DNA sequence: CAAGATACGTCAATATGGCTGTCCTAAATG
DNA sequence: CATTTAGGACAGCCATATTGACGTATCTTG
């Protein structure tokens, strides 16, 4: 990143390695980075009459087809009432469908419909463009560092769930 | 991070370096990392009858004393009506005070009161603990990578504002 | 089998934090 | 003087979350 000068780079080499400035830089880059990434899909979502809450559900269902409602609740960490509304919206628009669990019929296994897959792909491509640009700019080594720091912010208990997502469905 | 196995580490060494899995890992770690960091102060905020919006204002006023309302608006990227409510709440609780700009008397220069400084410090210490843990876990090199990727998510136009914060007030 | 736990759904009420649109004053600037 | 700028205020709306209570179908277990 051309914009970062040597002095900024060096701050991490200070004796403590945990100077307040370093912490604040992390808090702020995390806040602004997260904000800009999420805002980048608001327009496309609005054209569908959907909000960010819908995207989060769509995203995780895309990521792990046949996800159950309770697993989705754990990922999103919201109440089932809040999720219920979101899932109803998505079902009404025929973006998500569900079927009873084959082994436990109380469960609802969630999947995207064809239209849901298409929408999620469109939204993901915006995220990908932004993220790919940031990855490119920073380089491979930076990317692994980025992952590791963020994963260190996630409590042990939840980290397993997050890693499970990445091992595939 | 002991929990990351070699296979996960290696994914970045794939030919394209921008495989979908790498992008999704970034999106997800960013989402979960951000969520957990911000949730970590909700309880303390609730004891003061404040929400996250109040904290964001408090944070940036702490970071750059004598910030003007319009500069704060640019950082937060919300409408002045929304910010107005938040600033009124903070003023009522005597956490923030303002004085007219010495050169342009239309401006309001915002500062934390003593109580505001104390509260922000308490909130910041929670953020610091979490962030310091993540930094420690990941190591120095990871931390600079973390910063660089996130800064690559911020549009050029805003990046200057963010860097200005870190150069000190 | 009966009892209890679990998965999911729903109703009602409430809070937070955004938004738009409109109108206002005071002060700076041309 | 006219315009622009910094800030504020009002009304109303929307999205997303919350809690608590309650209902039903299904699975599990003593």
Image: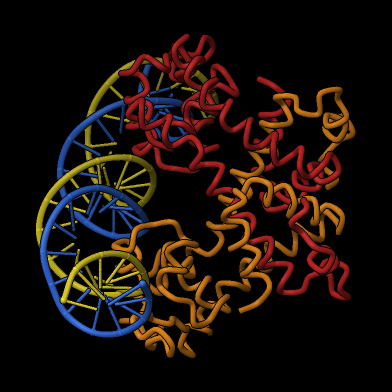
Chain colours: A red, B orange, C blue, D yellow
Pick the front one: A121 or C16: A121
The percent coordinates of residue B83 (x first, y second) are 35, 65
Q: Residue at x 78, y 42 (%)?
A: A143
**Which residue is at a point 47% across and 9% down the rendered structure image?**
A114
Quarter where residue C10 is shown: top left
| Quarter of the image where the C terminus of chain B is located | bottom right
Place of residue D8 in the rendered image (x, y in percent of width and height, measured from the top left): 25, 75
Q: Residue at x 46, y 31 (%)?
A: A55
Q: Nearer the viewer, residue B133 or A29?
A: A29
Badge count: 0
In this view, the residue in front, B123 or A155, is B123
**Left or right: where does residue A143 sit relative to residue A82?**
right
Residue at 30 percent across and 18 percent down: it is A92
The relative height of residue A85 versus residue B48 in the rendered view (above or below) is above
Residue B62 picture location, percent across and down:
54, 78
Which of the 4 quarters of the picture holds residue D23?
top left
Q: From the viewer's side, name the closer residue of B103 and B89.
A: B103
The picture places residue B37, in percent across and down from the top left corner, at 60, 57
Q: Is residue A95 above or below residue A158?
A: above
Determine the image quadrant of residue C30.
bottom left
Is the residue A19 above or below the residue B132 in the image? Answer: below
């Amino acid at each position: 990143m051309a914009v970062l000068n040597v002095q900024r780079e060096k701050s991490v080499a200070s004796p403590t390695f945990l100077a307040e400035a370093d912490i604040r830089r992390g808090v702020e880059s995390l806040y602004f980075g997260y904000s800009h990434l999420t805002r980048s899909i608001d327009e496309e979502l609005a054209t569908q009459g959907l909000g960010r809450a819908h995207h989060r559900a769509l995203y995780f269902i895309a990521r792990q087809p046949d996800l159950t409602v309770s697993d989705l609740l754990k990922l999103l960490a919201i109440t089932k009432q809040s999720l219920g509304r979101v899932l109803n919206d998505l079902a009404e628009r025929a973006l998500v469908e569900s079927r009873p669990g084959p082994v436990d019929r109380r469960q609802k296994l969630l999947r995207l419909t064809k239209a849901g897959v298409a929408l999620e792909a469109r939204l993901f491509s915006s995220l990908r463009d932004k993220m790919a640009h940031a990855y490119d700019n920073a380089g491979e080594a930076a990317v692994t560092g980025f992952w590791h720091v963020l994963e260190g912010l996630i409590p042990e208990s939840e980290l397993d769930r997050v890693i499970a997502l990445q091992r595939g469905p």
